[in-house]
Amino acid sequence: FNLRGTDLRPPPPNANLDDLTRGATFCLCPSGTGWGMRAFHAVALGCIPVIIQDDGSGSYPSVLQAFEGPLLDWASLAVRLTFADIPRLPSLLRALAADHEALAAKRRALVAALPRLLWREALATEERRALDAMPDAFDSVMEVLAGRRNATR
């Protein structure tokens, strides 16, 4: 399997990271300083995110991804690990890669989740039209806020 980081700086010479990511099965998305940009890049490029986050609280997942819970089931589209799982990472990914049904299910979940992570207005006209019938990131934010408002009433 190929495991790629999506935000190498500077990018490797003579390599297109987007192309490498599109060709990878899994993309490493360790915790960092943002809201999950590595996971977003992986999903947008069709690569199964390998999310490694663990804040030591004992709760799982300790860090939520975009729209996790009310709108997106990240367990269905990503591989989620804690720091303690890192020594077993190669064997875990090999096992998933060998399970063609599970891998196909994660890829279908990626495709289904992508529109909720895209901002329709930021897209070119052709891509924007392709999302017309689907909720985008703005719609998702509005749904989550409405759910929170209703929960507090």
Image: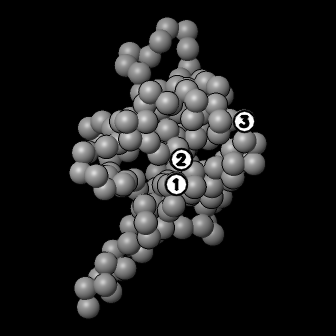
Labels 2, 3: front one: 3
In percent of width and height, residue 83 lies at 36, 36
Determine whether 97 is above or below 61 in the image. above
Label 3 element class? helix
Kindly report the distance in space between the C-alpha atoms of the residues bearing marks 1 and 2.
5 Å
Q: Is residue 91 visible?
A: yes
The residue pinned by badge 3 equals: 98
Examine the image and state in which quarter residue 15 appears.
top right
Position above or below: 92 against 13:
below
Res. 38 visible in picture:
no
Q: Give the alpha-carbon distance from disc 2 to disc 3, as whole Å.
A: 16 Å
Measured as percent of width and height from the top left, residue 2 is found at 61, 24
Mark 2 lies on a secondary structure that is loop
| In-image side of 21 versus 33 (left or right) | right
Left or right of 31, for residue 138: right
The amino acid type of the residue labelled 1 equals: Ala
Q: Earlier in the sequence, mark 3 or mark 1?
A: 1
Distance between mark 3 and mark 1 Cα atoms: 18 Å
Q: Are marks 1 and 2 in contact (CB under 8 Å)?
A: yes
Q: Amino acid at mark 2?
A: Ala
Q: Nearer the viewer, residue 93 or 149?
A: 93
Q: Which residue is mark 2?
A: 78
Which residue: 58% across, 41% down?
Answer: 48
Q: Which residue is identified by label 1?
A: 75
**Image: 55 above or below 144:** above
